[in-house]
Each structure stands twice: as C-alpha cells, then as structure tokens.
Image: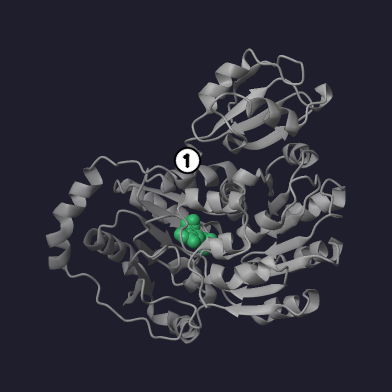
Amino acid sequence: MSKQSFKDYAISEEIIRALDSLGYETPTSVQQEVLPAALARQDLVVKSQTGSGKTAAFGIPVCELADWNENKPQALVLTPTRELAVQVKEDLTHIGRFKRIKVAALYGKQPFTIQTAELKQRTHVIVGTPGRVLDHIQRGTLVLDRLACLVIDEADEMLNMGFIEQVEAIIQALPGSRVTMLFSATLPRDVESLCQKYMNNPVHIELEAAGVTTDQIQHSLIEVKDADKWPLLQAVTIVENPDSCMIFCRTKEQVDQLFIRMAALDYSCDKIHGGLEQEVRFEVMNAFRRGQFRYLIATDVAARGIDIDNISLVINYDLPMEKESYVHRTGRTGRAGKQGKAITFATPHEGKFLADIERYIGFAIPVMKAPSREQVALREPAFEAKSHARTTLKKDKNEQINAGIMKLNFNGGKKKKLRAVDFVGTIARIEGVTAEDIGIITIQDNVSYVDILNGKGPLVLEVMQTTNIKGKLLKVRKALK
Ligand code: AMP
C-alpha cells in the first residue's frame, strides 16, 4: 500500500516538521520504498536516478536514527564528488534541523585543519568523498567506533571514477554491526559484487526499469559533422532560447574552448570542470543556481548528481563515451515533476557509442533535423531580446531555507564549561522563544555558535546582550558565516 504522508512512517515530529518546512508533502516513490526498510535498519540496494528524491530517502532515516546525545559520528555518507558531498550535507542539515543534527562534509582540497577541528566537535553525520574520508580514518581524526550506518551514494559513479579501493578500505575499517545502504542509478557488476561482499541480505529496490524517463524529458538527436558542431550549437540555442541550459563536452579542454567561443558571442555563460579550483567550482554552481548566467558548459564529473531547479535544456555537444553518462547528463533536466529537453549531437563515426547508449536506455533517440535558416531567422529576435533582458535572480533553495535562520556567536565554549543544554536552557526562557526556535549548536574551545530559527534571531541577539548563561555574561554577535 502506498503511503501518502510522512506521518505514516515511524518518523519523529521534529523530522516531519523539517520536511514540512522544505515543502515535502508526500513521499516520492523511492522514499515510499526505502523508508520502512531503512527505518527498520535493513541493508538496502537501491537502483534509482538522481532527481527521484533519493537523498531524502536515506537522509530521513539517517537523521531519524541518529542519537543526538552521542558525540561520535553515527552515519557516514560517501559521495563521488565534492559538490555532491556539500549538497548532501546541506540537504541532511535541513532534514535534521529541528533535531539539531550536526553534519560535516569531508572532501579533498579543503585544508585538513578545518575539517579536523570540525571533527573534534560533536558530529552526528559525516558526508565525504572516499579519498579524504580514508585520509581522516588513517590519521585517526575520524573516529568510527559508534558508526552505525553507511550510505554509498551514486555507487556506480564512485566505482567509475576509480574509488573502489578506497571504498573497500573504508568499509573494512567500519564496525561490522552497521547498516549499509547503497544507491546507484545503474547496477554494473562491480557494484553488485561490492553489495555481495559487504552487505547483509540486502533488500533490493528497483525504481525505473528503463534507466531514463521519457515522460518528463523529450530526447532528440541531431547528426552533425565535427566541424559543424559550433554553428549547430548556435542555431539550436537560438531556436530553443532556454532560460537555463547545461552543455556537456567530453574533456576540460573542450569545455574551455567552447566557453571562449560562447563568451565571445556574449552568451550568458560559465564553465565547470575538474581542472578548476574547488572554490571556483562551488561559486560557479551557486551562481548558476541563482540564475546569474544561463548556459553552463561542463564535463561529466563536475555535474554529477547536482540538483538544480529548472534546467530546461541539456545539450550533449559531445556524445558521452559511457552509456551511463547519457542518463546522468540528461537527468539534469526534467526534475521534480517539470518537463525538460535533451538534445544530443552525434558525429557519423560515433555510431557504436550511440548504439550502446540506445541499447542501454531501451529506446532509439528520435532523430531531428538541424534547425533551418528560416527557423533560426524567425527566432533570432526573441533570442536577442532574452540575451539583453535583465536577469531576475532566483533565490537559491538553501538561501531561502536559511532566510529565517540567524547564527549567533558567543565568546565562550568548552573552556568555560559551557554545554548545549546551557544555551538551550537560557535561550528557551526568553519570552516569545521556545526550544523549537533553536537550531544547531556548535561548541568550540573558546567560542560557540547557535542557530536561531524562525526569524527569532534579532530578538535573541538583543536579549542575550544582558542575559547570563551559566552565571556568565558572554559577548554575543551575529556570526559571519
Ligand atoms: P534528489 O534525487 O535527492 O537529488 O532530489 C531531487 C529533488 O527533489 C530535490 O530538489 C529535493 O529537494 C526534492 N524532493 C525530495 N523529496 C521530495 C518530496 N517528498 N517532495 C517534494 N520534493 C522532494
């Protein structure tokens, strides 16, 4: 029987309230399948696309089953890319907000010192990329003895990227009594064998038999010679005139080249690939989310699993070499019930790869003609008008959710023997404030951070200027981060 409300599951009121504030009303299909088994601590292998709500499918049980009083990490989520680690961390933080679940992200290129300091705090959930997580395990900075749940997200991509040895080394370092959940868009043999080796009679859940949704995404193919791809791209973008579009190339050099060409023609565009600094990658993704530019040129790696609302068009400027990539790339559009379009360019000598993709997705991608000169001329004025129109910035989903939250910085922490209960006890006594208005609390040696929710930040900030905590008057101000 399908359940229509999150209240039908064994989920606490705090989590239900968080889901409500995220606007999640009914569980998606993957959530309906996963929640009962995961909440009953069963091992799971889930074949499901990104965009299906799978982050919450594991995020809800991870937050629900976490014990707030435990200081050591209880759940570990492995993701293939840094962007996805940060996104999953944010999603889990939102889901666990009212339970004050603390989530930390561990990924390469960020200094160890920052992450090690964070790991010294009470942290309930770790989300990370395999290399950095393993480094922390080997350095002894990530303690695993209370770890009760492992989630392997985007497992096929993780193994594709060559992380198998790290993933296995991590699994071997974990307590045997844990629950393991594996999520993958596809289940190639190496993923299956990982499941057999390290999981305990897992429940198999399979969502879409055909790997690709055709009801929400209109797929088409244009045959083109290499030399004609650039003029074809211009024609397609003029005719389609998308508000938000991702263009995939095979290599970072090709991304760089196409970016230069498009920028020279004043396309509102930016680029992302693995050769860019991590900070730049985050900035580009955030700017794209906010709608600061319309065309994002990307390689596969950087865009994997990324959840951006309202991408109306995906263009495969280069045909993907891996059949699975076709599914992941086109899955950037047609998300969360919206309609999308995916247009793929294929050159005459790419027939073998195309046949592979079509066998894999289970249908032949309908061939369409390149836009005619007349079509292009007809649509050009609208294209020009849109490219000169002022962009209205969208609020990033996280920014919207964070709007009612103010982080306060108190100049005292562990060394003054302060604990989370001291903050909760004091702040919840302020008139007009309840414990439910208090979010995540982080206590460091000399400073503490407290999230105040529901727009009550300014009130708490004012009252705390003159209110003692545990007999001490602390300096309090709005935190910068
Ligand atoms: P994911 O597959 O985890 O990348 O999620 C895809 C999108 O669906 C994300 O934007 C989620 O915030 C959203 N989402 C997840 N679960 C629900 C739900 N039950 N109702 C509405 N939206 C959801």
Q: In this view, does 29 lie to the left or right of 219?
A: right
The image quadrant of residue 463 is top right
Q: Residue at x 52, y 74 (%)?
A: 321
Establish if 409 lies above or below 92.
Answer: above
Q: Residue at x 37, y 56 (%)?
A: 310
Number of marks in picture: 1
Q: Which residue is drawn at 74% across and 28% down?
A: 422
Establish if 380 lies above or below 266.
Answer: below
Dot 1: what SS? helix
Q: Position of residue 17 (x, y in %)?
A: 54, 49
Q: How are the residues colored?
A: one colour
Whether ligand 1 has any atom under 8 Å from the Cβ at mark 1 is answered as no
Q: In the depicted view, which residue is nearer to us: 277 or 405?
A: 405
Q: Is residue 284 left or right of residue 315?
A: right
Q: Position of residue 247 (x, y in %)?
A: 40, 60
Q: Can residue 304 be seen in this view?
A: no
Q: Can residue 372 be seen in this view?
A: yes
Q: Where is residue 359 in the image (x, y as percent from the top left)?
A: 48, 87
The C terminus sits in image quarter: top right
Q: Is residue 284 left or right of residue 274?
A: left
Q: What residue type is labelled 1?
A: Glu
Residue that mark 1 sits on: 399
10 Å neighbourhood of mark 1: few (<14), some, or many (≥20)?
A: few
